[in-house]
Image (cartoon, rainbow, N blue to C red):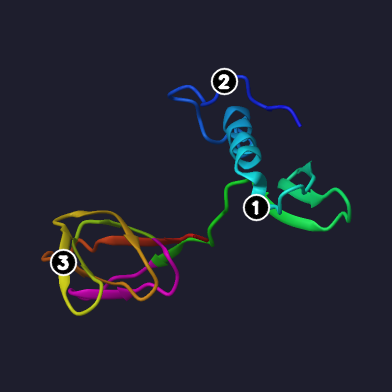
Amino acid sequence: MSNVSQQPFPRLGTAFVDEQRMLAKPWYRLLITLWQRTGANLPIGGTVILNNTPGGIQALDAGTGALLGYVPLTAAVGGPPVVLAPAVSPFGYQATAPGTLVVTGAQVELRRGAIYYIVSPAGGAIPMLINDIVRLTWYNPAQLPTATFFPSTV
């Protein structure tokens, strides 16, 4: 099989995904080239058929048709946002999935393990892992902070 790519690397600034959230062609070509040059994890002498499907690339054994691997080419979508309702300061939230907590109007402390770390004095986007705990603290009871958790699939 000939080399899919004429240029070894995508140009700087090339988007990784296109408007349809599919892997952009220069990156697709780079991945195919890397796969081909590293043997695609096949035994020596193995022949592979690469099948481009709407969701990704399938690697099939040319002799048996067995699926050898699959590379998804669409961006994974996270779960629905969870709007939190902080009412009493301090307010705690423990992540049950990985994701990002977006906070406005409160000091944010993150606990991973036994220690809380101040990560923002006034809010922001806080990446969280499963079982991370965030503590929000604010001092004006008339002005409650907002907090929304955006779960991810990664």
Measure how far apart labels 2 and 1 are at the Cα level.
Answer: 23 Å
Instruction: Please identify the quarter of the rendering in which residue 96 is found.
Output: bottom left
Q: Which portion, as a residue range, is magenta? A: 84-99
Q: Report the residue marked by disc 1.
A: 41
Q: Residues within 10 Å of mark 1 (few under 14, many from 20)?
A: few
Q: Earlier in the sequence, mark 2 or mark 1?
A: 2
Question: Farthest residue in the top direction?
Answer: 6
Please provide percent x and percent y for residue 139: 11, 66
Please provide percent x and percent y for residue 120: 17, 56
| Contact flag, marks 2 and 1 (Cβ < 8 Å) | no
Q: Is residue 92 magenta?
A: yes
SS at circle 2: loop
Q: Report the residue marked by disc 3.
A: 117
Query: Closer to us: mark 2 or mark 1?
Result: 1
SS at circle 1: helix
Residue 33 in the image: above or below residue 57 = above
Q: Nearer the viewer, residue 49 or 54?
A: 49
**Residue type at mark 2?**
Gln
SS at circle 3: strand
Q: Report the residue marked by disc 2.
A: 7
Question: Farthest residue in the front direction?
Answer: 44
Query: Closer to us: mark 3 or mark 2?
Result: 2
| Quarter placement of the N terminus | top right
Residue 130 placement, left or right of 28? left
Residue 91 placement, left or right of 138? right
Residue 73 makes an appearance in the image: no
Residue 53 in the image: above or below residue 123 = above
**Residue type at mark 1?**
Asn
